[in-house]
Image (cartoon, grey):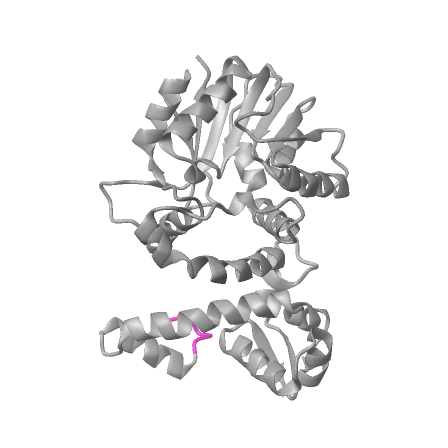
Amino acid sequence: MRTWLRGDDLLERAAIRLNLAPLPVGLTFFGMPAARTLSLAQKLGVLGAVARSPATAEEVAGAAGIRPPGARMLLEALCGMGLLRRRGDRFGLARRARRWLSPESPRYIGTFLEHTHDYWEWWGELERVLREGRGFQIHAAARDAPSWPVYIRGQYELARLSADDVARALKLPPRPRSLLDVAGGHGWFAAALCARHEGLRATVVDLAPSAAVGRQIIAENGLSERVGHVEGDMFAVDLGGPHDAALCFDIIHHLSPEQVVLLFGRVRRALRPGATLAVLDMFRDPGRRPRASASFFRLFFHLTSGADIYSREQLAEFLAQAGFGAPRRRRVRSIPDQALYQAEAI
């Protein structure tokens, strides 16, 4: 048994396992405040304030622009979630939480947490989407919408956790020179591949507001000589080429089957014969019971794009229709909920 669990936590878990406590009540009553409390704490700068040094509720209230009584309740709730620790009247990040919530950590994901604050409004649309079947298209936000920098930088923070592993897993053609990254946004997966392959340069194609943020991220990391951005719709913009490899990461779950085939076909025409297309996404196995996380993601993508998670068999069919060979899976341990496939251009 994990030693950091308190006695009351152990009793609660035992009651749930024995079906003596109404788990559905806990899921609905505590799930909502946990998500809202954490995302709001990040958005208000509460987590950043206590990451620098332990602070009192009054100090946090002043930094976040909220009242001290509310700040104290918010901080205590974060303590209850195991993210903060309290010593006397001062609150600071718990040791385990610093890895993810300290801005000084290379595994910081605070910007992603801030972006999840927008999800609250999105989930409020669930009933309408389930009735009408039309998602609300999160990528259709106005170019100057303040959500774009938070969205793309949050995705960049997540990409940092697995990009090096993905780059090691992918098998590119010998001495690759040109890489196409479709809807790559932050460009960090392309950057990791460029770091691994001498002489490789990447072109990231994405919508204008996404590309603008990605260009900043690449410049901040001193990689503008190797990774460039082209602004435009992936279904209309010139993809350039011929390229030695292409990435389509975390995009097909936003597309209909017809759109997936159309996109893969455009990518195929931008590649050399024998070039590699890599697809990273979540995939479902119709013959197995889905994991809870995969089920929620599937519902989330339906909500935000009206699309779905595809199976490996569907992916193989899409690729074949677009002129690619059978996909081969590459194992990436750091992203267990996703799968990386690559196929060769015929």
- Camera-side residue: 136 or 78? 136
Q: Residue at x 25, y 49 (%)?
A: 289
Q: Residue at x 43, y 80 (%)?
A: 6
Residue 122 at x, y percent in the picture: 46, 57
Q: Quadrant of the C terminus?
A: top left
Above or below for 173 versus 125: above
Above or below for 23 versus 138: below
Above or below for 208 versus 258: below
Residue 183 at x, y percent in the picture: 56, 34
Residue 52 at x, y percent in the picture: 72, 69
Q: Is residue 46 left or right of residue 79?
A: right
Magenta span: chief secondary structure: loop
Above or below for 336 versus 326: below
Report the number of discs. Answer: 0
Q: Quadrant of the N terminus?
A: bottom left
Q: Is residue 277 left or right of residue 177?
A: left
Q: Is residue 294 visible?
A: yes
Is residue 195 rendered magenta in the image? no
Is residue 3 rendered magenta in the image? yes
Q: Residue at x 65, y 18 (%)?
A: 177
Q: Which residues are magenta?
A: 1-5
Give the quadrant of residue 54: bottom right
Residue 8 at x, y percent in the picture: 38, 83
Give the quadrant of residue 49: bottom right
- Camera-side residue: 109 or 40? 40
Q: Is residue 339 visible?
A: no
